Image (cartoon, helix red, strand yellow):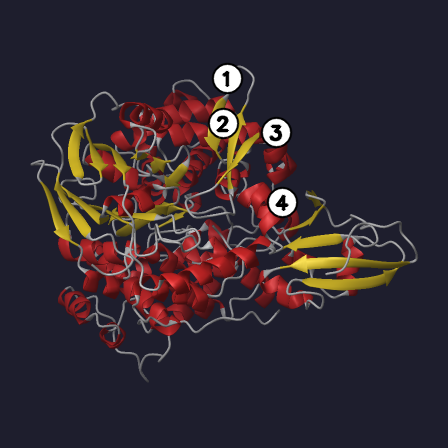
Amino acid sequence: MSDTSPKPSSNLMKIFLRAGGQLREKLRPDTDHYTRKVEYDGEKTISDILKLIEIDQSFIAFIYANGEIKDFAYIPLDGQTITLQPPVSGG
Amino acid sequence: MGNGLAGATLHINLTSGEIKRVPTDEQFMREWYGGRGVTAKIIYDQVPRNADPLGPENIFILNAGVMSGSLVPAGSKVSFGSVSPLSNGHGDSNMGGHLGPALKFAGYDTVIFKGVSPKPVYLYIDDDKVELRDASKYWGMGSLECEPNLKHDLGEDFEIATIGPAGENLIRFSCITHDFGRQAGRCGQGAVMGSKRLKAIAVRGTGSIKVHDLKGLTKYVSDIIIRTQTHPNMAPWQKYGTAFFIDWSNKNGVMPTRNFQTTHFEDSKGIDGDSLVEKCLVTHKACFGCWMNCGKYTRATLPGKKPVYLEGPEYETGSLCGSNLGMKDINEVAYINWLMDNQGMDTMSGGGVVAFGMECFQRGLITRDQIEGQTLNWGSIDDVEHFVDMIVHRRGIGEWFAGGTKRAAQFVGQGSEKFAMQVKGQEMSGYDGRWAPGMLLAYMTCDIGAHHNRAWTITVDMAEGRETIDGRAKVVVYLQHIRPLFDCWCICRLFWGELDIEPEEIVQSLNYVTGWDVNFPEALRTSEKIWNLSRCHYLERNRSNGRTFDYPPARSWEDKIPSGPGKGKGLVKEQVEGMLDDYYSCRGWDSNGNPTRDVLEDLNLKFAADNLEKIGLLGQPIPGGIPEVRGERYKPKAF
C-alpha cells in the first residue's frame, strides 16, 4: 500500500477501503489482500462512496477510521484509509 | 500418550471422595474429538435416561480438548458438560481464559465428577496432587469474591473456576465463572456443580503438551500472527470486542427490545460500543494464546451504588441485559452484568428471565404483591436488582423464575407462554428471528435450546432475503456442523469467523498438534455424528417426536414487529413449519423430526438407532433415501 496519510483535499479524491471476511470478497481488493483504492471527484460521504462501488451498507457493522467509529455520513480526507467492519458472526 | 493430550483422566466420586487417575483413551478422543463431543458420548452412555439433571446420577465433565494449551491461536477453551437442567437433554458450555491450558499443563485432559459431596468442596489440582478440599468458608460467596479469595489462599498462579449463590441454590440458568469474568454460561452448568456441592475448581499446572509436528505448527502459527496483525478487523476488535455490534443489530432490526416485543431500541446509543469504551473501559483483556484481546475489563459507576469491576458487557449481555430490559445507559448494563456474574447466573438467560418477568408485570400478569411490594419496570436498575435477589434466594415467585423462562411461564399462565422467549427451556440469544428466519430456525433446532453459537445466520438472511425461508435449512445444518467443531477442539472460533482463517487451515493445525491426519469433510462428518447423538439423547430423555420440541414461542409468528426498520415484518406459522420440513429433509430425518436408521447407521450410530427403535421414536425411512451430504458448504449468493 502506498502512503495513506491524509492530504489536503482536491477535486480528485483517493481513499483506501479495507475489509475482511465476506465483505473483502465484495470489496474486490486491488492494492493488497484486504485493500481497494477508490478514486472519485469531490468530497463524498462513506454512504455515497459505497453506492459508487455497489456495496450494500447493511453488510457493514461500522466504519473505523483514525482509531474511532465513524458513521456513514463521514467524509474521508484525501488519502485516508478506512476500515469497513463486517458484522460479527456470533461469538 | 498421543500428541496434543495431557495424558490422564480423573474420575472423582464426590459421594465417597474417591479420586482415580486413569490414562486418557486416545482412540476415544480421536473418535469424538474431545470437548463437546467427548461429553456428548459419556453422558449418553452413562447417565440414566430418567436421572434428574440436578440429582446424584447426573455426571459433570470438564474436557480441554486436543488444541487447548497448544500454540494454536486462542487455544484457550475448556468445555463443561452434563445433562442440562434447562433442557433436560445434552448440555455443554465452554469458556476461554486460562483454565483449559492449566488443566492440560497439570496433566489432565478430562475430569469426570459423579455423585454428590456430603459437604461443600472444591477440587484442588496442583500438578500431581489432586484433592477434594473443604469449601465451607467459600460457600455463599459471590463468584467474583470467591475467585480472589481462593487465589489469596492458594496462590495467584492457580486458575479458578467457581459458582456463585445462584449455582448453590440450583437456579437452573447458573453459570461457571473464571478469570474475573469469563463464563461457561449456558445450559445451567453452574447449577449442576451446585447440585454436587462443588463450589470451585482450582488448578495449577507446570507441565507441557507434546505436539506431533512442532516445526510445522510453529510456522503455521507465525504465519497466522503476521496475517492477522494486519487484518482490517483486528484493530476494531481489539478496541471494542463484540460491543460494537449493538449499533448494527439495532439498525438492522434484530435487537431484542423489552423482551423481544420489538427489534429496535430507541436509546441504543447509550449502550453501544462507543459508550462502553468511553464510560467504562479500564483495560483490554485476552485469553491464553490470543492477541485479539476482545475482552473488556470495565468499571460500572452508578449514583448511590459502589463502583464495581467486571469483564463486559459484550454484545449478548449488552443486548439481553440492555435493550431487552429497557436500560438506556451503559453503566446500568454493566452493573447488571456484574450483578449476575457475581450471583453466578448466565447473563443471557438471566436477561431473558428478568425481561419475561418485566413483560408479565407490564401486562398485569404478576402484581406488586407478588414481588414484595416492588415494581418491575423497564429500565429500572433497582427493580432488576431486587428481582434477581428474589430469584437467587427463591423468595416468593422468585421460585417460579428460578427454573428459567419456560418453567416460569407454566406458573404465570394466562397466555404468557406466547412470549416466553426460549426453545427447549433455554432462553434466546440476543437476536430476534422474526426478520431473520434462518436465525429463528437456528434457535429452533439447536441441540441445547435457543443458542446462537451453534449457527448464526443473520447476514445470510440479509443476503438471501429476509422475508423468505428458501435455502435457510441447508445453511443452518452446515453451520451446526462447522461451529461446534471449535467446541470440540477447545479453541476460540473468532479467528475463523472474524479473521479469515480458513477451516482447512484449522484442520491442518489440528493435524500438526495431533498427527491424526484429519481432513475437513471428515471433521464435518464427525460433528454431524455428535449432533445426531445429542438429538437421540434428547428424544430418549424427553420421549416424544422431535418436532414437538422444535417450536419457538408463538410471538415468533403471531406478532409482527411493531417499530423500527423491521416494522410490520414477521413470519407466519406456515413458514415456521416449512423451515422445519426443509431442515429435517436436509438432515435425513423424518417429518416428525426423528433421526432415521439410514442416517444414524451412516454415522456409525447403530446403537442410537436401536435405542430409538425400542421407544418408538426412530424416524420412518425417507422415500428415495437420505441425502448423501447433509449440510454442504455454504457460499452466500450476495457475495
Asked if the residue under mark 3 is in contact with the one under mark 4, i.e. CB atoms within 8 Å, the reply is: no
Earlier in the chain: of badge 1 and badge 4, it is 4
Q: Secondary structure at mark 3?
A: helix
Residue at mark 2: chain: B
Earlier in the chain: of badge 4 and badge 3, it is 4
Establish if B89 lies above or below A22: above
Q: In whole angstroms, how far apart are the C-alphas of marks 2 and 1?
A: 9 Å
Q: What is the x, y in percent for residue A88?
A: 55, 53
Amino acid at dot 3:
Lys
- The residue where tag 4 is placed is B247
- The residue where tag 1 is placed is B305
In which quadrant is the N terminus of chain A drawn? bottom right
Give the quarter of the image for residue B301: top right
Q: Secondary structure at mark 4?
A: helix
Q: Residue furthest front?
A: B215
Amino acid at dot 2:
Tyr
Earlier in the chain: of badge 1 and badge 3, it is 3
Amino acid at dot 4:
Asp
Q: Nearer the viewer, mark 4 or mark 3?
A: 3
Residue at mark 3: chain: B
**B70, B189: nearer the viewer:** B70
Callouts 2 and 1 in the same chain:
yes
Residue at mark 1: chain: B
Amino acid at dot 1:
Lys
**A75, B567: nearer the viewer:** A75
Determine which of the numbered discs, if any, sits on residue B335 in the image.
Answer: 2
Asked if the residue under mark 1 is in contact with the one under mark 2, i.e. CB atoms within 8 Å, the reply is: yes
> Viewed as shown, does residue B202 lie left or right of B299?
left
